[in-house]
């Protein structure tokens, strides 16, 4: 699996790089859309290769974290801004999609954690991608609300709630295991990787369908970094 993932990455780099060059040079809308399809699917393959590599690292006990002291409130805020920008681009290109709205609520300005920022971003994006993947099945617009708060002096919690289709009851008990999916797209590796990343940080992760029958809530905790001085 490790060798296969590395072999996948090698041809993907020029495809992504040259697609990007062409996207900046092409002015014809139809041609731009064709290049965009190539780039989008190459990125999907890249994510698959990265997921396979992450699974081999997790199972081999070699998943390394580059921890630094950071403000989790600001980190999540930046992830949401970037995600909203990407959503706006997609919704402009595919007008038949349901509207997707992200909201962010926190009473905190600063929650320090010792964490690998890239890995925490990966977890949040995995959850958001999971929610938006099934947006087309909704009879209504999708609303995702993210809340961040301190539980006490040494722990903080993130809730990501959506009003989508919810988690299939057959998948729910094994959601965080490998290949847990009923979807025709995706490998079912994302949640397995996300949970292992959170646990490697000393946190916990779980999910449940919402009591009102609309959508699901994904939750994870992280230890709060002690205040210096």
Image: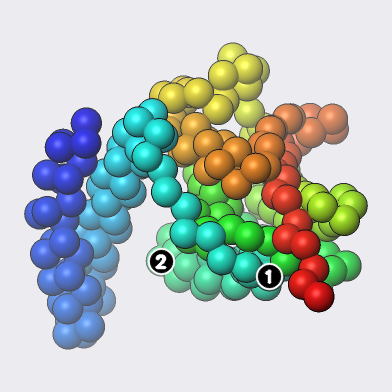
Question: Measured along the vertical axis of the image, is residue 193 above or below residue 103?
Answer: above
Instruction: Tell which of 149 and 105 is nearer to you.
Output: 149
- Residue at (65%, 42%) from the top-left corner? 202
Q: Quadrant of residue 203?
A: top right
Determine the secondary structure under disc 1. strand
Question: Measured along the vertical axis of the image, is residue 25 above or below residue 136?
Answer: below
User: Which label belongs to residue 71?
Assistant: 1
- Tally the numbered discs: 2
Determine the secondary structure under disc 2. helix
Q: Mark 1, residues whose alpha carbon is within 10 Å: few (<14), some, or many (≥20)?
A: some
Instruction: Classify residue 21 as left or right of residue 97.
Output: left
Instruction: Tell which of 90 and 53 is nearer to you.
Output: 53
Is residue 48 something that shows in the picture?
no
Q: Nearer the viewer, mark 1 or mark 2?
A: 1
- Residue at (72%, 45%) from the top-left corner? 221
- Residue at (22%, 83%) from the top-left corner? 24
Residue 212 percent across, percent down from the top left: 85, 32
Q: What's the coloring here? A: rainbow
Instruction: Tell which of 69 and 229 is nearer to you.
Output: 229
Q: Quadrant of residue 195?
A: top right
Residue 210 percent across, percent down from the top left: 79, 33
Name the residue tied to disc 2: 93
Which of disc 2 and disc 1 is earlier in sequence?
Answer: 1
Q: Mark 2, residues whose alpha carbon is within 10 Å: few (<14), some, or many (≥20)?
A: few
- Residue at (56%, 41%) from the top-left corner? 200
Q: For the residues marked 1 and 2, what is the alpha-carbon distance in whole angstroms?
A: 34 Å
Question: Measured along the vertical axis of the image, is residue 104 above or below residue 153?
Answer: below
């Amino acid at each position: 699996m490790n060798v296969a993932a590395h072999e996948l990455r090698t041809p993907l780099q020029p495809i992504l790089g040259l697609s990007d060059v062409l996207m900046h040079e092409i002015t014809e809308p139809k041609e731009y859309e064709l290049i965009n399809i190539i780039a989008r699917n190459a990125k999907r393959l890249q994510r698959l290769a990265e997921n396979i590599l992450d699974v081999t690292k997790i199972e081999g006990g070699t998943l390394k974290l580059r921890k630094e002291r950071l403000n989790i409130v600001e980190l999540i805020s930046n992830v949401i801004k970037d995600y909203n920008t990407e959503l706006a681009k997609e919704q402009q290109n595919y007008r038949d999609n349901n509207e997707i709205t992200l909201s962010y609520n926190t009473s905190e300005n600063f929650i320090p954690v010792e964490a690998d920022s890239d890995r925490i971003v990966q977890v949040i994006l995995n959850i958001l991608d999971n929610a938006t993947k099934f947006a087309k099945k909704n009879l209504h617009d999708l609303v995702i609300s993210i809340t961040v708060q301190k539980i006490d002096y040494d722990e903080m919690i993130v809730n990501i709630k959506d009003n989508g289709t919810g988690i299939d009851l057959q998948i729910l008990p094994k959601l965080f295991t490998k290949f847990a999916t009923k979807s025709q797209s995706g490998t079912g590796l994302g949640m397995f990787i996300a949970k292992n990343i959170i646990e490697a940080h000393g946190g916990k992760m779980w999910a449940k369908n919402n009591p009102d029958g609309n959508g699901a809530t994904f939750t994870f905790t992280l230890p709060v970094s002690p205040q210096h001085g």
